[in-house]
Amino acid sequence: MHVLNFMFIYRFFTLKEKESEVRSKESFWQRNPQGLNSSSANLKDWHDVEAMEREVIRKGIGESGRPAYISDQSKLELKEEMTKKNGFNAVLSDMISVHRSVPDTRFHGCQTKKYFANLPAVSIVIPFYNEHFSALVRSLHSIVSRTPSELIKEIILVDDFSDRVELKGQLDDYVRKYFPKVEIHRFRKRQGLIAARLAGAIKAVGDILVFMDSHIETNYNWLPPLLHPIVLDKRTVVCPMIDVIDDETFEYRIQDEGARGVFDWMFDYKRIPLFVNDMKDPTKPFESPIMSGGLFAISRDWFWELGGYDEGLDIWGGEQYELSFKIWMCGGRLLDAPCSRVGHIFRKTDWPGVTSDRKDDYLYKNYKRVAEVWMDEYKQYLYHHGHGLYEKIDAGDLTEQRALRNKLHCKSFKWFMENVAYDLLKEFPPKGTTDFAFGQIRNVGAPNLCLDTLGPPDYRPIGVEQCEKEKMFPSRNQDWSLSENHDLRMRGEEYCLQAVQKKANSVVVFYDCHNGSSDQLWYYNRKTQWLVYGKRRNFCLEAYPNYKEVVINRCKRNNANMKWTFVHVNDTLLDGYFKTLPT
Ligand code: UDP
Ligand code: MN
């Protein structure tokens, strides 16, 4: 198919068409209905021992993944320039052989592991956008030389409208010369990595799709450990353990002993320690809540049953959450296989990252699409950390995504959080979860009025305002917390309430929180509904509804303007309030 038509078809493919196309072909699992999960299934040592021996004796710069340096002073200026452009030392990349060897970083025991002798051939999909030439072709050489050729059906490169000339004709020529199984598809406009992966997946005919980045080096025998668990269960998705290719020296080394993937509430990808059980046999694949993103193997059937990626996700970001949530919630699982190792160039942290000419905030739009469709009530944690950003963003049409979730009878996000990512909340407590109480604070005497910052937090008395509709997660103006430091603050922030003087009718203003000081001591008495101030606990917050002001005054029963309701009180924590109070 010509590239022009290809793009046209890509955009107008509906999910249903994609599925029916897939169904019409018999998959590996249909051809091999039984026997694979029985112990009698044929196992095989897939190592190419001869090739490994040839690699080990290679000599030269960067061989065996050893760190390399540029000694030629005349190249330093070019090095700076190229590093800025690529986010890694591209000049050094050009000096290191594209066939260089890597160290065997696998755990002891992987070297003798056997996998099914009957494994399906894969389609490897690699999107690239302005990738440095030698890094790209080194990725390809590493794949082709370290993978049994019968296991590679095809390698599909998708050029996301790169504008570097060497990635056009020169790359075509190179591929024609060295890589008969590689085909290149080119976008006619920049669409981002999610669209590129989808486009590659649509073209793919292998029973298993393997997604890779364009700046990787596979390690010895990397593929069989990814495929074996998928053969056992085609709804299992498997990631390799990702090694580090140093952005400066190209040293190839391990990242750590392995970790489980999760996220924090800014939606940054995070890694947390393995469980003791997972470490008993370090060669055994372990469950991980979230994939790190670009490198994984998934059966083609399962990928399309899950609708691939949401086509509304633009350019870059959020897609690994979408797919990981879907995999777990809709009946699959996600593993990391420690005997499969792939090195990846993590670019310099000061590299500006993926640029795009998109006008809208595509990243947060992606996040919001994922949150709206999959995260149920937990989406509020995310939104709450966005400081009003999410509220301004239109996530677009989500009908198709929601229909998919219904059709597949996917479980709730609560299920995911409690059964898969059960330590996430502990590791990354969202704002509010360590608070004695949080959210809107409503006055009892004037129940349509809520405690309000009356603007940005500066040295100005706070007051009361019309209560906002959203109570648990109102805007910053009405979102309070009685925090674990026993202060009353803007939730998740460092602005604390303090009376200007400890005497009747004193106004209340913001100061920077100085955790634990008696000037900032507050308590919520659930019985009297008082917000009690100070160490001696004889002053209470009182509203003057007519003036929309608040002050402190001597606590007095039967004064409804002195009574407040906190929208969310953590009774267990509040029961222990005095125990945690420093003396
Ligand atoms: N990529 C792409 N289009 C984009 C951004 C990225 O095709 O708009 C490719 C990129 O060349 C790489 C893969 O997608 O092969 C993953 O992107 P990247 O490496 O930037 O992600 P990271 O590893 O930094 O998370
Ligand atoms: Mn990458």
Image: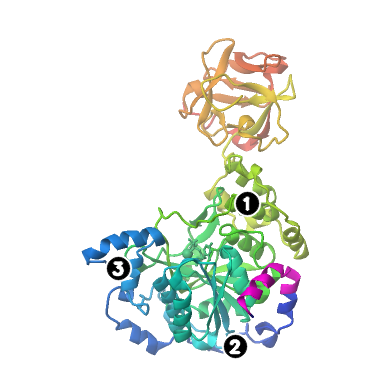
**Dot 2 corresponds to which residue?**
41
Residue 510 has which mark? none
- The verdict on label 3 being within 8 Å of ligand 2 is no
Asked which quadrant contains residue 48, the reply is bottom left
Q: Residues within 10 Å of mark 3 (few under 14, many from 20)?
A: some
Asked which quadrant contains residue 397, the reply is bottom right
Q: Which residues are magenta?
A: 2-18
Q: Residues within 10 Å of mark 1 (few under 14, many from 20)?
A: many
Residue 67 has which mark? 3
**Disc 3/disc 2 C-alpha distance (Å):** 42 Å
Identify which residue is drawn at 61% across, 15% down: 551
Q: Secondary structure at mark 2?
A: loop
Residue 365 has which mark? 1
- Residue 175 lies left or right of residue 415; in this view the side is left
Prevailing secondary structure class for the magenta stretch in the rendered image = helix
Q: Do the residues under discs 1 and 3 have CB atoms within 8 angstroms?
A: no
Comparing marks 1 and 3, which lies closer to the viewer? 1
State the image coordinates of residue 184 (x, y, percent, origin top left). Answer: 54, 77
Q: Secondary structure at mark 1?
A: helix
State the image coordinates of residue 347 (x, y, percent, origin top left). Answer: 41, 60
The kind of residue tagged 2 is Ala
